[in-house]
Image: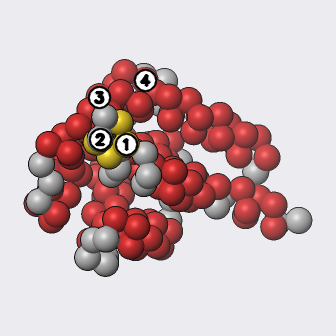
Amino acid sequence: MKLVPNFLKVLPLLSLFSIMMIGSSWHIAGFPLMPTLLLIPVYYWLVYHPSWLPQEGLFVIGLVYDVLMGHALGVSSILLMGSTIVGRYSRSSLRPDKFLLIWLGFVFFSGGYLLLYALCFSGGIELFVSWIFGVILYPLVVLFLSHLHLWIQSHV
């Protein structure tokens, strides 16, 4: 009987994987949506339920992302796993009922992540446009993730 609750706890990682697979081929006006699109579910689960986002899962997601994007293996894994440290410290100051505050937190979180990402992969205007798209798409993706979150909590 524990199989179903344990499977449901894997759904946050599957949401990251799904968004990564879908977003890796999406472009708006010739600019990629990744890596910022991948940061939305990472940030969401770090704020609302960090125990459902294990380090091992982020490591694997980072490796798959590096393979998809043709980057050096492990760099995205280190950045994603490092983001949990930031999430752990900022979570106490973020209140789940204050959406604008959490959205502003995402702006700074994703901006810092992309700055480190740019240092590792020498990104330019593409990363800046990806960041803008991620900030704009944040409420839409969070709407889906919040429904998934409520559904998981009602079944676990």
Question: As rendered, which of 94 and 121 lies closer to the eye?
Answer: 121
Farthest residue toward the right?
Answer: 1
For disc 4, the marked residue is 99
As measured in the structure, the alpha-carbon distance from the residue carrying label 4 to the one carrying label 2 is 30 Å
Q: Earlier in the sequence, mark 4 or mark 3?
A: 4
Q: Position of residue 151 (x, y in %)?
A: 72, 40
Secondary structure under tag 3 reads helix
Q: Nearer the viewer, mark 4 or mark 2?
A: 2
Closer to the N terminus: mark 2 or mark 3? Answer: 2
Q: Indicate the position of residue 39 as horizontal and vertical percent values.
A: 38, 48
Let me know if residue 108 appears in the view.
Answer: no
- Between the residue at mark 2 and the residue at mark 3, the CA separation in whole angstroms equals 26 Å
Q: Amino acid at mark 4?
A: Phe
Nearer the N terminus, badge 4 or badge 1?
1
Residue 104 numbered mark, or none = 3
Can you identify the residue that label 1 sits on? 27
